[in-house]
Amino acid sequence: MSTLRYTNGILIANLMPFTAALECDWDQLRDLTRRLKAIDGINGFVVNAYAGEGPTLTREERIRAIELHRAECNRDQPVIAAILDISTAGAVTQARDAELAGADALLLCPPIASSWQAHASPQVALEYHRAIIEAVSLPIVLFQLAVGDPSSYSHALLMQMVQEFSQVFAVKMAQAADIVRYDQDWLALQSCGRCIFAWPAVGSSMFHCCTTGADGILTGLATFAPHEIVAMFRALRRGELHPARELHRRLAPMNHRIYGHPYVDLHCRYKELAFQAGVISTPYVRGPMIRVNERERVALQATLDAAALRPIG
């Protein structure tokens, strides 16, 4: 793990392009990955996450996506497989498949259970994570969400999992607009007794989170705005607030649109913007998600034009 670039750069939660028939477009994914991996500051990729519509992929498709990224990425660029299933047994199978397919680490998304609220029933998350961690030998990334999301771990539960599971080495910090929660979680991670990387993930609050502290960024936003995300992160790491703030302000209208109401369209907006920016050639999404409507497309295009993103090549 020491040779892999987990810090001081960007991890991209990659998209999964589909054909009009909603088949995985492997050639397009390979081309996208090759272009992104060559950008200075891109450390690696997260595969089969929500941005990549992982829950809609078959077992074979998830395995192939991991194998493709591992084959295309540089050896020092980690490939992290997101794990998400309706059952613990299914998640364990995904984790074992990911390890065999060449994943370097696992991002464990919160478990899915009817009416589950993580803060009220923490034992569900504990047993879910324990079962997966005991089944594989890979390092683990936890996934923290904002207060108000039913799957958000309480601060106490997050720190309990960090302390109890020695395989945990990083946390995807998706606290969204809850900057106080980000601060609370980040500060506790810094004093937990071992090195735990913190990776903010939500574009609309990324600037604010990084001013508190971050070891890198993990986001699907970097599929179509990689240069800008790298530049903002590096500026803040150097303590150069002014250029970072200017980048944040330029991207803010687009980010507010992406992460706005209804939040369920977040990843569909990623894909639509990637299509509008010419990063991918098809905007199709698999159900139950639905491509954003024409009015939303026009609004997204306006924010994209204003953001003036640098092409990815």
Image (tube, rainbow, N blue to C red):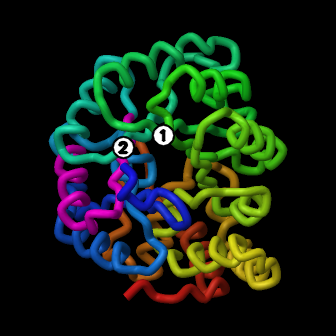
Instruction: Work out whether residue 185 or residue 50 is closer to the camera in this orientation and state it.
Output: 185
Kindly indicate the quadrant of the structure image that contains residue 4: bottom left
Compare marks 2 and 1 and give the one earlier in the sequence. 2
User: Which three-letter amino acid code belongs to the residue tagged 2?
Assistant: Ala
Under circle 2, the secondary element is: strand
At x 69% / y 52%, what residue is drawn? 261
Write down the region rendered in magenta.
62-83
Find residue 203 and report its horizontal and vertical position in percent: 64, 62
Q: Count neighbours of disc 2 (C-alpha within 10 A) and say few if under 14, some if 14 to 19, many if 20 or more.
A: many
| Residue marked by disc 1 | 141
Q: Is residue 284 magenta?
A: no
Rendered view: 156 above or below 57: above
Tell me if residue 133 can be seen.
yes
Mark 2 and mark 1: Cα distance apart in space: 7 Å
Tell me if residue 293 can be seen.
no
User: Which three-letter amino acid code belongs to the residue tagged 1?
Assistant: Val
Task: Check residue 167 in the rendering and tell me which mark sits there, or answer none.
Answer: none
Rendered view: 110 above or below 105: above
| Residue marked by disc 2 | 105
Rendered view: 280 above or below 192: below
Find residue 193 and report its horizontal and vertical position in percent: 65, 33
Kindly indicate the quadrant of the structure image that contains residue 72: bottom left
